[in-house]
Image (spheres, helix red, strand yellow):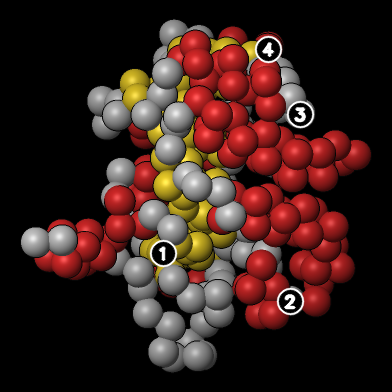
Amino acid sequence: MRIVIFGATGRTGRHLVAQGVARGWTVLVAGRDEARLNELNGIAGVARVDLADTSSVAAVLNGLKPQAIVSTIGGAGPDALLIDEIGNNAISDAALACGVRRVLQVSSLACGDSRAYASERIVAAIGPVLDAKTRAEDHLRHSALDWTIVRPGGLTDGEPTGQGALYDDPRAHGRIARADLATLLLDALATPASIGRVLSAVDRSTLPAEPADIAEFDLAVAASASRAATR
């Protein structure tokens, strides 16, 4: 697969790059910070882009010609809302204009319908960012793209546990190591059965015992069911 990763210079993005290359995929990265992008030169193809400008994103996509896009962009400080909403919307719009149909957007738990199950502490701390991410989710969901949205729980920088799991249930919450999240994102990107779904991503060991009826979204099982339905 030939993919472009937006946000590849971040802590989750670097795991995505390393794991994508390890799978034998052609990995290309695009972002704003030329110095940080150059750290990935030699590992992945790099391109500088203005994420606030759809035409700039489209020019990059037309030049790199990916089969799929992963957006794991996110802001901090005064430009957080600009990146989380405008940047993601520019990626979605440019993908549609350039004919790149497959887009996976990394959002966050406490966005959209998972907001009702979020802690008051999280909402108080980053409520405006969550609102911006929710609007970006809605923008992508109402596009004609083959989209998947993944909402990770609290991100940790520890060693991967191998216990990362996806849940098609807004009640799911917990934590997840960035390395495990990267694995789930690439697996979902490569599985058409994830198209049109909003999935939560947490470590199984951090999922609360209640409610007890939260079931995992197994990509392999979903893919098998999808193939059977089309026969």
Which quarter of the rendering shows the N terminus? top left
| Left or right: residue 1 compared with residue 48 | left
* Location of residue 188 in the rendering, given as x and y in whole percent from the top left corner: 36, 50
Identify the element where label 2 is drawn. Answer: loop
Q: Mark 2 points at which residue?
A: 119
* Location of residue 192 in the rendering, given as x and y in whole percent from the top left corner: 30, 51
Q: Earlier in the sequence, mark 2 or mark 3?
A: 3
Whole-angstrom CA distance, mark 3 to mark 4, is: 16 Å
Whole-angstrom CA distance, mark 1 to mark 2, is: 20 Å
What amino acid is labelled 4 in the image? Glu
What amino acid is labelled 2 in the image? Ser
Residue drawn where x is 56% and y is 49% of the image = 143
Q: In which quarter of the image is residue 56?
A: top right
Identify the element where label 3 is drawn. Answer: loop
Q: Which of marks 3 and 1 is nearer the N terminus?
A: 3
Instruction: Say whether marks 4 and 1 touch (CB < 8 Å).
Output: no
What amino acid is labelled 1 in the image? Leu
Q: Name the residue under label 3.
A: 52
Q: Name the residue under label 4.
A: 34
Whole-angstrom CA distance, mark 2 to mark 3, is: 31 Å
